Image: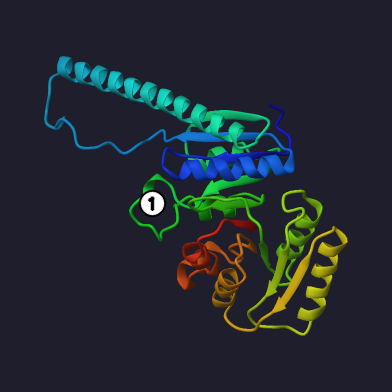
Amino acid sequence: MKNENKVLACVDQSRYAVHVAHCAAWAAHRMDAPLEFLHVIDSHPERGPGDDHSGAIGVDAQESLLAQLSAEDEARAKSAREQGRLFLNQLRERALAAGAARVDVRQRHGALEDTVVEQAQGVRLLVLGRRGAGAEVARRELGHHVEHLVRALNRPILTVTEDFKAPQRVMIAFDGGTVTRRGVEMVAGSPLFRGLPILLLMSGKQSRDAPKSLDWARDTLKAAGFEVTVSLVPGDAETVIATAVKEQSIDMLIMGAFGHSPLRGLLFGSKTTDLLRSSRIPTLLLR
């Protein structure tokens, strides 16, 4: 597969992978783009409790133990590769059945963030589960990779929740800034949302330029053939957006992500994180 304008879907062996596959297949079909599934095997998985290898042992016993551990590591790695291969092939079949025309799979050892950054050239859209294998119990928690990947990549990232369905109504959380203006231009120029009605919502603290910015965004989308509804609602952005999603039956949200530094987010919290935790719909994050 040519590494050009592809949809890259990051998957792990959790039940959320099926939803990521369906969403990625939908996006690839809409964009007429090749789809690739990426599965990263952690090179340093945590090991469960096993035999007690502590204490002083002789040289021969030490060499025997090292050989045993090496054989166990090799067997574990081989098993992980085979499980990953079967897992990826199943997702590939699902994506083809869902309408994706060109589907490839790739498996790598290493850290997810580093691997995705290495594979980012030619990626038009990254699709990522909002939760993964580590979040099966903590239902409101985000997968710990989400924010790291969004901050590391200069690519649109579509984060997926459970039970993906093709969206019928899309909302852009527009703040008039550079990132969301680029997002409007991206939506206008992409086939991903073509033919879907769009709600253009501005909330939060209002500026004098807000109406002018909204007019620009509306006109840009209308010129591209979109049916656009504009809404300017003062108030807390998270509350306003969440209310609009529910009242307007929005299926997909487009918004800027993590506008402040990671340190600021750690100290004061993040609107992006709060919205992702509370939202039940797929969200396209822009950086």
* Residue 260, quarter of the rendered image: bottom right
Q: Is residue 124 left or right of residue 115?
A: right
Horizontal and vertical percent position of residue 143? 44, 52
Horizontal and vertical percent position of residue 182? 76, 60
Q: Is residue 74 left or right of residue 124?
A: left
| Circle count | 1
Horizontal and vertical percent position of residue 193? 72, 53
**In percent of the image, x 11 and y 28: which residue is there?**
56
Judge whether 145 appears above or below 71 on screen. below
State which quarter of the image contains the N terminus.
top right
Horizontal and vertical percent position of residue 18? 49, 41
For disc 1, the marked residue is: 135
Q: Is residue 229 left or right of residue 168?
A: right
The answer, for residue 123, to whether it is visible in the render is no
Callout 1: SS: helix
Residue nearest the viewer, comparing 7 with 97: 97
The answer, for residue 126, to whether it is visible in the render is yes
How are the residues colored? rainbow
**In percent of the image, x 73 and y 57: which residue is there?**
196
Q: Residues within 10 Å of mark 1 (few under 14, many from 20)?
A: some
**In percent of the image, x 55 and y 40: which residue is there?**
21
Residue nearest the viewer, comparing 136 with 178: 136
Judge whether 244 appears above or below 73 on screen. below
Please, what is the three-letter code of the amino acid marked with disc 1? Ala
Judge whether 199 appears above or below 251 on screen. below
* Residue 70, quarter of the rendered image: top left
**In percent of the image, x 55 and y 50: which residue is there?**
149
Residue nearest the viewer, comparing 108 with 62: 108
State which quarter of the image contains the C terminus.
bottom right
